Image: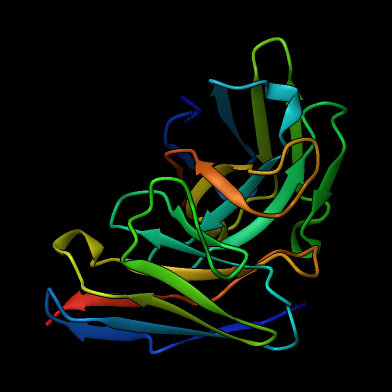
Amino acid sequence: EIVLTQSPATLSLSPGEGATLSCRASQSVSTYLAWYQQKPGQAPRLLIYDASNRATGIPARFSGSGSGTDFTLTISSLEPEDFAVYYCQQRSNWPPLTFGGGTKVEIK
Amino acid sequence: QVQLVQSGAEVKKPGASVKVSCKASGYTFPSYYMHWVRQAPGQGLEWMGVINPSGGSTTYAQKLQGRVTMTRDTSTSTVYMELSSLRSEDTAVYYCARDDNIAVAGGRFDPWGQGTLVTVSS
């Protein structure tokens, strides 16, 4: 089973600041990595697929990069609605499909 | 637009079973695999398994093998997830999530249902 480790667990930032979230895989997942955003009381939403492709309707301030075992989600300038929990997920080698433990982006 | 609407919250006793439904609309139901993902309170996301709505074939997470059953009803575009021998650790929000690849299970989730809270308590 591929284990995904996200860091940091919590990121405290102010609106307008940039955010950099990390996801590390226990073995190579090539670029078969996605990022999801989850707000309190809501279902997750697909943001980025295959490491660097924005899903439909996702603003350009969200970008993804990486390959192999190290990946980054970058939010260029935080909007109030971006404060949420972010999960990475791999589909390189499954079952099982696996998720990282999440990074909470909170208002400083 | 694509929509997944799940059944309502459930409260069950340990040892019982629960069956959660997920009704799909806005697309050709048999063409997209459907996954189930759960989230314990304050915790992360756990993949449970996937069903092919076309033929009904399933793949389950190993830790749930023997307790989980996924089925579908093509006449109503609905998939079901039944979990048996419930224990307190099964208390979670259960989500259905469509695979976003047509005709194959690509392993990516978009969109998601609204979630169904299942509480297991004596």
Q: Is residue A108 left or right of residue B43?
A: left
Q: Is residue A32 left or right of residue A62?
A: right
Please name the colour scheme applied to the rendered image.
Answer: rainbow
Task: Kindly tell me whether residue A50 is visible in this rendering.
Answer: yes
Q: Which picture quadrant has residue B30?
A: top right
Q: Is residue A26 left or right of residue B65?
A: left
Residue A28 place in picture, x, y as percent: 75, 84
Q: Residue at x 74, y 46 (%)?
A: B50
Q: Is residue B97 above or below residue A75?
A: above
Instruction: Work out which residue is located at the far front of the displayed protein and give it.
Output: A60
Of residues B3 and A58, the one nearer the viewer is A58
Residue B16 place in picture, x, y as percent: 63, 42
Residue B61 place in picture, x, y as percent: 76, 59
Q: How many marks?
A: 0
Q: Residue at x 84, y 30 (%)?
A: B56
Instruction: Work out which residue is located at the far top of the displayed protein and give it.
Output: B75
Q: Residue at x 38, y 77 (%)?
A: A74
Q: Residue at x 36, y 66 (%)?
A: A62
Q: Is residue B113 above or below residue A49?
A: above
Q: Which picture quadrant has residue A93?
A: bottom right
Q: Is residue B53 above or below residue A69?
A: above
Residue B80 place in picture, x, y as percent: 66, 31
Task: Kindly tell me whether residue B43 is visible in this rendering.
Answer: no
